[in-house]
Image (cartoon, grey):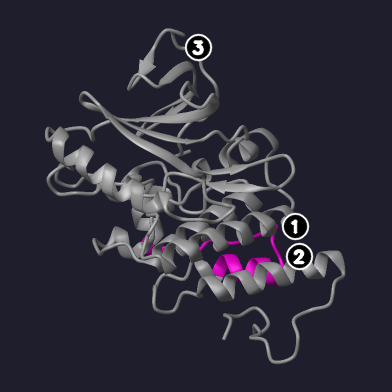
Amino acid sequence: MTDEQTRPTPAAPSSRSISGRYTVTRELGRGGMGVVWRAEDTLIGRPVAIKELRLPEGAEDTGVFQERVLREVRAGGRLNDPAVVTVFDVVADGDTTYIVMELVEAPTLADLVREHGPLPQERVASIGEQVLTALAAAHEAGIVHRDVKPGNIMVAPDGRVKLTDFGIAQAVDDPRLTTSGMLVGSPAFMAPERVAGHEALPASDLWSLGATLFYAVEGSVPFERSTTAATLHAIMNDVPYLSRAQGPLASAIMGLMITSPEARISAAQARHLVSLHARQVTGQPGPLAGQPGTPPGGQAT
């Protein structure tokens, strides 16, 4: 699966210090954009997570990389939503850039599906609703995540969700940093307009969330094929089939994965559908008269 691993690995040397303030205790996970460490903020005595960012392969301009990370990640750090991982600090220490974040001790959605297989529809609907709220807050602030995927969504045992890595893909996607033809983001969760070479839009995040929710409810990545080229071709041309999701949740997932960003359902429409699914499961009353509805099996209006 084209997703970063987040499972714990052996401990790091306890004597390592970052910027004279953060003492690293152990590694939490690693992926294409860097390594995540558990650390202690010695100034105020709290545990934190620190992402050590790697300069993109083939790039040489460390200064440009650090400048963009500082700008983009700090912009994302201003978001105030319960489903967004809080950013405390961005540190440039030598040639390495670190993002100091809220420590969330929970598995990622990728971990959950790998371990347990497809998740129940009501749980997927709850995850979708929380991530949609986070994305709506980001898009309202002019921020596009650009790398929504199962490995960037953490799910606590009580059902609370945290979306991480705001601003990182945006910081890396710079022609002065990336080599020709390099893909920024996870190919299997990349929206069709981005595959076609266009700029990432808020709707691009929504498509990626649709593919992510498909993965959560089906247990398989909808467009992943044996090669990157085949995966990108599938994103542009294939229509996946849902076998486990039904009703409003299925309408939300398929509406989010409409190829044309102009025809794709909005975050508000998707939230209406997933919350409607939750109400149907719990037997609560449906939407009030006058609220936007969804035609059977179709796109919200």
Rendering quarter of residue 281: bottom right
From the top left corner, tell me how far across and down residue 254 is, in percent: 56, 68
From the top left corner, tell me how far across and down residue 134 is, in percent: 53, 58
Q: Amino acid at mark 2?
A: Ala
Mark 1 in CB contact with mark 2 (< 8 angstroms): yes
Residue in the picture at 57% in, 86% down: 301
Lateral position of residue 142 relative to residue 298, left or right: left
State the SS at label 2.
helix
Compared with residue 132, is residue 62 higher up or lower down, i.e. above or below? Answer: above
State the SS at label 3.
loop
Q: Which residues are magenta?
A: 236-254
Most foreground residue, 229 or 133: 133
The outermost residue toward the front is 43
Q: Amino acid at mark 3?
A: Ala
Mark 2, Cα crowd under 10 Å, few <14 / some 14-19 / many 20+, is many
Rendering quarter of residue 273: bottom right
Residue under pointer 3: 11
Residue in the picture at 34% in, 44% down: 168
Residue under pointer 2: 278
